Image (tube, rainbow, N blue to C red):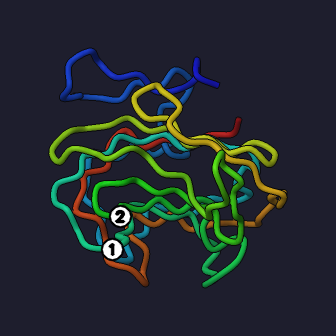
Amino acid sequence: NASEAPTASPVRQIDQCRYKKCLSLLGQSYAPFVPTQGNTLTWVNQPPIDHRLYFGLTPHTLQNGWHSVMNFSTGANAGYGSQVPGVWLDWNILRVRWGGIAFAPIGGTSPYLSSPPLNLGQTYCFMVTAQGTHYELYMDGAKVAEGDAEFLRTQLSSVKVYAGTPGSPAADATISDLCYAAM
């Protein structure tokens, strides 16, 4: 829903992403930070099946290959629960995936949703939504990707929230204004 998407100030450099209905990650607020490999932020018990994830992101350098921004995970190495969602930087493209789910976006099938190219040093406001079998990615208030999957997510007992997954290098980017909520 575009009316729920985060909005940015009219200038190119953003001081804060502003969300209409979400203020924190499970009541915990975080100052802007750079993810590090294996950094655990918190656990989420009974995470909502249909959810929104909001965050600001400022990429600092181009890194070759996929680098972890954040990951909600049961600890599984593959399949559903391994990333619910997982957020990555691949060079200057933000990629979002839910482990074990392939999307049917316009023009083909992909295991992830992707942003347009990002500029280094610029802050972007993202919203990721999962509702039923439909997934959307918003950037600065505009929908930039969406897809549908045949797989319907199920209730998980708990997930660990990483800012930089244990098994992958962390992205050189600042995360800000982090928020996670049920749809």
User: What is the three-letter code of the residue carrying label 1?
Assistant: Gly
**x, y percent for residue 71:** 50, 64
| Image-based side of 68 in relation to 25, left or right | left
The C terminus lies in which quarter of the figure? top right
Q: Is the residue marked by circle 1 packed among few (<14), some (14-19), or many (20+) residues within 10 Å?
A: few
Helix, strand, or loop for circle 1?
Answer: loop
Q: Nearer the viewer, residue 94 or 21?
A: 94
Task: State the residue at coordinates (38%, 35%).
Answer: 125
Residue located 39% across and 63% down the image: 163
Rendered residue at 70%/64% (across/down): 102
Q: Residues within 10 Å of mark 2 (few under 14, many from 20)?
A: some
For marks 1 and 2, give the CA distance. 5 Å
**In this figure, which residue is indicated by the disc labeled 1?**
65
Q: Which residue is mark 2?
A: 90
Q: Total of numbered circles in the picture?
A: 2
Q: Amino acid at mark 2?
A: Asp
**Which residue appears at 23% of the width and 68% of the height?**
63
- Say whether disc 1 or disc 2 marks the residue closer to the N-terminus: 1
Image quadrant occupied by the N terminus: top right
| Residue nearer the viewer, 157 or 87 | 87
For the residues bearing labels 1 and 2, Cβ distance under 8 angstroms:
yes
Q: Position of residue 148 (x, y in %)?
A: 74, 49
- x, y percent for residue 41: 43, 62
Please state which of residues 140 and 147 is positioned toward the viewer in this rendering: 147
- Residue 92 left/right relative to 182: left
Residue 140: quadrant of the picture: top left
> Quick one: SS at disc 2?
strand
